[in-house]
Image: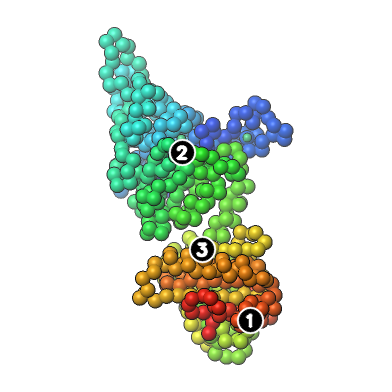
């Protein structure tokens, strides 16, 4: 797996992924010694491609943090030392010119995290009498007890009487707590332990670290503990810049690891700015599955709405101006946009979807967008604008997202409450979601719908997509709907909420 490379002057920190594979590593030996028919495409690549060029060649999960201190000095902190450690040293330490390891952190004591500890002597200075500074190893008491059994000779302090000196890894064992509130410092960098369940009978550690960027590394997890979630989730105000997360199988589930479906669910809950997946079996094909993940990431979008009231009658001019606006927003990270017009011509809505990373600084983005609306401002008054999260969707064709095309009818409701209300926005969104789901089930002709939660205001909105204007009109006889406008993507509509407790966007 590729590394996040150093800058050319090497004056910055870097993460080097020494391994991103499961315990048995990839290629899976069986796929090569008893090949299936047809052979496993992921594993057979290892027969024709050097490992260093092959992202489908995955050793045991392990991360090397190349930490550049303020004085420019580099410290090398290794997380986990698995069965494939020696191979990882030969491949990546040479490529990235890593001269030694300054400290070691263990997530847990399983074989794929610890069985390379014997080989640590290979990256330590040579001394036949073991007369060197030991490398600190940070681990829990539970892991320590297991290491004593696995490697008694690495823990033993003094030689027994008559025992010959033999050269072994020199390690300085440091016990850490599996407690988020008890951080520790390794080679000058602070780490917050992140306890997670790795099977229901086992607690494993992930780690949170980083000064400029908040990074969490969680390699072995089947379930998150609430306290850990509160340290790394966007909802608790602790959004991560990067989450490195376990995913074992693509299609199946597993009792002690997250698999792809659960990993993606976890990403939605934790909502890091960026995520990298590790721990994969040969089910995963790096290039093919990354294409899927790019698509998936795109679906996790910020949406924004600009609502206008036209001041002139020539709607086509306004549409042209908004189309020009759409075009300009592409440079700012907008990946999809649409223009809606209400049937009465008294409302225009511009909708844009943004990749979350491009909207980190919403205030300045909003200011830029407003400044780009000069040609529109002579034709329409901006009534409202804001960013929304899509938080639930329904579709009658079982596709995972609401889709709309030019010619579709779209109806929108919004509901808001003032700050005088005591209900938290989460409860409010759940209440609106319940109404949304109930309505969607009973609305013949509505093909899909999606709920949006405002990021700035106590407000939610629901959008329904209809294939026919007639269907939309027929719902309870209570609906006023707009007809689509000629050159526009989508169309405009208004559904005053028959049982939706709040204000409609449309008046
Ligand atoms: Zn295979
Ligand atoms: Zn494990």
Picture colour scheme: rainbow
Q: Is residue 175 left or right of residue 367?
A: left
Q: Earlier in the sequence, mark 2 or mark 1?
A: 2
Residue at 58% in and 78% down: 495
Check disc 1 and report its element: helix, strand or loop: loop
Q: Is residue 13 found left or right of 285 in the rendered image?
A: left
User: Which quarter is ligand 1 in?
Assistant: top right
Q: Whole-Å distance between the Cαs marked 3 and 2?
A: 29 Å
Badge nearest the viewer, 1 or 3: 1
The quarter holding residue 420 reads bottom left
Indicate yes or no: mark 2 CB to ligand 2 under 8 Å: no
- For marks 3 and 2 on the same chain, the one whose residue lies earlier in the sequence: 2
Q: Earlier in the sequence, mark 1 or mark 3?
A: 3
- Nearer-the-camera pick, 447 or 4: 447
Nearer to us in this view, 480 or 147: 480
Which residue is identified by label 3? 391
The image's mark for residue 159 is none
Image coords of residue 472 (percent x, y):
65, 77
Please state which of the two labelled residues, at mark 2 or mark 1, is closer to the viewer.
Answer: 1
Residue at image position (58%, 49%) is: 290
Q: Position of residue 396 (x, y in %)?
A: 65, 63
Residue holding disc 1: 477
Asked whether mark 1 and ligand 1 are closer than 8 Å, the reply comes as no
Instruction: Please tell me in which quadrant of the rendered image residue 482 appears.
Output: bottom right
Q: Residues within 10 Å of mark 1 (few under 14, many from 20)?
A: few
Question: How many neighbours does mark 2 have within 10 angstroms: few (below 14), some (14-19), or many (20 or more)?
Answer: some
- Indicate the secondary structure of the residue bearing disc 2: loop
Whole-number angstrom distance, CA of label 2 to CA of label 1: 54 Å
The residue that mark 2 highlights is 199
Kindly state the secondary structure of the residue where label 3 is placed: strand
């Amino acid at each position: 797996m590729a590394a996040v490379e150093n800058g050319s002057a090497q004056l910055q920190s870097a993460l080097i992924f020494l391994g991103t594979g499961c315990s048995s590593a990839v290629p899976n030996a069986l796929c090569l010694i008893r090949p299936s028919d047809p052979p496993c495409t992921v594993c057979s690549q290892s027969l024709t491609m050097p490992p260093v060029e092959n992202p489908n060649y995955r050793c045991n999960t392990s991360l090397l943090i190349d930490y550049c201190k303020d004085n420019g000095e580099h410290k090398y902190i290794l997380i986990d030392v698995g069965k494939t450690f020696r191979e990882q040293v030969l491949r990546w330490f040479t490529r990235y010119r890593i001269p030694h390891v300054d400290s070691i952190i263990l997530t847990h004591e399983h074989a794929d995290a610890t069985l390379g500890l014997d080989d640590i002597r290979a990256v330590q200075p040579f001394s036949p009498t073991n007369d060197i500074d030991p490398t600190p190893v940070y681990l829990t008491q539970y892991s320590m007890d297991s290491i004593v059994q696995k490697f008694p000779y690495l823990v033993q302090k003094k030689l027994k009487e008559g025992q010959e000196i033999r050269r072994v890894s020199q390690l300085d064992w440091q016990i850490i707590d599996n407690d988020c509130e008890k951080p520790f410092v390794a080679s000058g960098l602070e780490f917050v332990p992140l306890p997670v369940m790795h099977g229901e009978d086992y607690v494993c550690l992930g780690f949170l670290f980083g000064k400029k960027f908040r990074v969490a590394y969680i390699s072995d997890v089947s379930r998150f503990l609430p306290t850990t979630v509160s340290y790394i989730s966007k909802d608790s105000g602790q959004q991560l810049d990067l989450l490195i997360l376990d995913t074992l199988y693509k299609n199946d589930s597993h009792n002690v690891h997250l698999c792809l479906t659960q990993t993606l669910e976890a990403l939605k809950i934790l909502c890091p700015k960026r995520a990298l997946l590790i721990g994969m079996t040969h089910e995963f094909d790096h290039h093919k599955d990354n294409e899927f993940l790019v698509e998936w990431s795109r679906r996790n979008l910020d949406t924004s709405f600009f609502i206008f009231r036209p001041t002139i009658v020539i709607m086509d001019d306004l549409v042209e101006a908004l189309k020009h606006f759409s075009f300009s927003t592409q440079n700012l990270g907008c990946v999809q946009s649409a223009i809606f017009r209400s049937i009465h011509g008294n409302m225009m809505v511009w909708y844009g979807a943004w990749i979350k990373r491009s909207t980190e600084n919403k205030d300045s983005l909003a200011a830029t967008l407003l400044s780009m609306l000069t040609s529109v401002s002579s034709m329409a008054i901006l009534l409202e604008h804001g960013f929304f999260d899509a938080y639930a969707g329904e579709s009658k064709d079982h596709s995972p997202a609401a889709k709309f095309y030019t010619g579709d009818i779209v109806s929108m409701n919004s509901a808001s409450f003032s700050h005088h209300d005591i209900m938290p926005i989460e409860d409010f969104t759940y209440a609106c979601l319940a109404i949304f789901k109930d309505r969607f089930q009973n609305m013949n002709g509505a093909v899909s719908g999606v709920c949006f939660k405002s990021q700035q205001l106590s407000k939610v909105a629901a959008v329904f997509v209809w294939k026919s204007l007639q269907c939309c009109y027929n719902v309870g006889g209570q609906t006023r709907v707009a007809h689509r406008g000629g050159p526009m993507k989508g169309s405009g509509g208004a559904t005053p909420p028959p049982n939706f407790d709040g204000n409609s966007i449309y008046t």
